[in-house]
C-alpha cells in the first residue's frame, strides 16, 4: 500500500510531467501544472482515507498489548507517508508559485486543510 510507485510526487513522475510541457504555450502550461497538483491532492486524499480505514483495523489489534510495538511502527510509517506527500506538493507549489498565482494559493489552502 505505502510502496505503490504511483503514490506521491516522485522525481521521476515530475520529470515526465515537465517533459510533456514542452511545446505548450504559457497558459496551457499553467493549466497543466494546476491539474497536476490537483491530481496530487486527490491522491493524497485517497491515501489519507485508505490509511484511516487501515487505522480502524489497527484498533482491533490495539486491545492486545503484544501488538502495540507493531502498531506504533505502522502508525509512524503511515504518518511519514502523509508528511512526505504533503511536503512534495508544497515543494512543487513553492517552485511554481509565480506561474500559478492565486490558484496556487488556493491549492496551498486546500493542502493545509488535509
Image: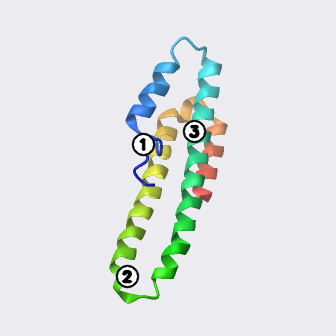
Query: In the drawing, what numbered circle is on residue 5?
Result: 1
Please indicate whether residue 8 sits to the left or right of residue 68 in the image.
right
Label 1 and label 2: CA atoms lie apart by 28 Å
**113 versus 98 height, above or below:** below
**In the depicted view, which residue is nearer to us: 71 or 10?**
71
Q: Nearer the viewer, mark 3 or mark 1?
A: 1
Residue drawn at point x = 59 percent, y = 22 percent: 29
**In the depicted view, which residue is nearer to us: 85 or 90?**
85
Please indicate whether residue 34 sits to the left or right of residue 68 in the image.
right
Q: Which residue is mark 2?
A: 68
**In the depicted view, which residue is nearer to us: 68 or 89?**
68
Q: Position of residue 87 (x, y in %)?
A: 45, 50
- Which image quarter is the N terminus in? bottom left
Please indicate whether residue 95 sits to the left or right of residue 27 in the image.
left
Mark 3 and mark 1 residues within 8 Å of each other at the beta carbon: no
Within 10 Å of the Cα at label 1, are there few (<14), some (14-19), or many (20+) other Cα atoms? few
Label 3 and label 2: CA atoms lie apart by 36 Å
**2 versus 51 height, above or below:** above
Q: Nearer the viewer, mark 3 or mark 2?
A: 2
Does dot 3 land on a helix, a strand or a loop? helix
Does dot 1 land on a helix, a strand or a loop? loop
Mark 3 and mark 2 residues within 8 Å of each other at the beta carbon: no
Question: Which tag, 1 or 2, sits closer to the chain's start?
Answer: 1
Residue drawn at point x = 40 percent, y = 60 percent: 80
Q: Which residue is mark 3?
A: 37
Within 10 Å of the Cα at label 3, are there few (<14), some (14-19), or many (20+) other Cα atoms? many
**4 versus 74 height, above or below:** above
Amino acid at each position: 500500500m505505502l510502496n505503490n510507485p504511483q503514490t506521491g510526487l516522485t522525481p521521476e513522475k515530475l520529470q515526465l510531467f515537465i517533459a510533456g510541457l514542452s511545446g505548450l504555450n504559457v497558459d496551457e502550461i499553467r493549466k497543466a501544472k494546476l491539474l497536476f497538483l490537483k491530481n496530487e491532492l486527490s491522491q493524497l486524499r485517497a491515501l489519507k482515507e485508505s490509511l484511516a480505514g487501515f487505522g480502524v483495523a489497527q484498533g482491533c489489534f490495539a486491545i492486545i498489548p503484544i501488538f502495540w510495538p507493531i502498531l506504533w511502527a505502522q502508525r509512524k510509517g503511515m504518518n511519514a507517508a502523509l508528511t512526505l506527500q504533503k511536503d512534495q506538493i508544497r515543494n512543487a507549489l513553492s517552485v511554481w508559485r509565480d506561474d500559478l498565482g492565486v490558484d496556487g494559493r488556493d491549492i496551498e489552502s486546500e493542502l493545509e486543510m488535509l
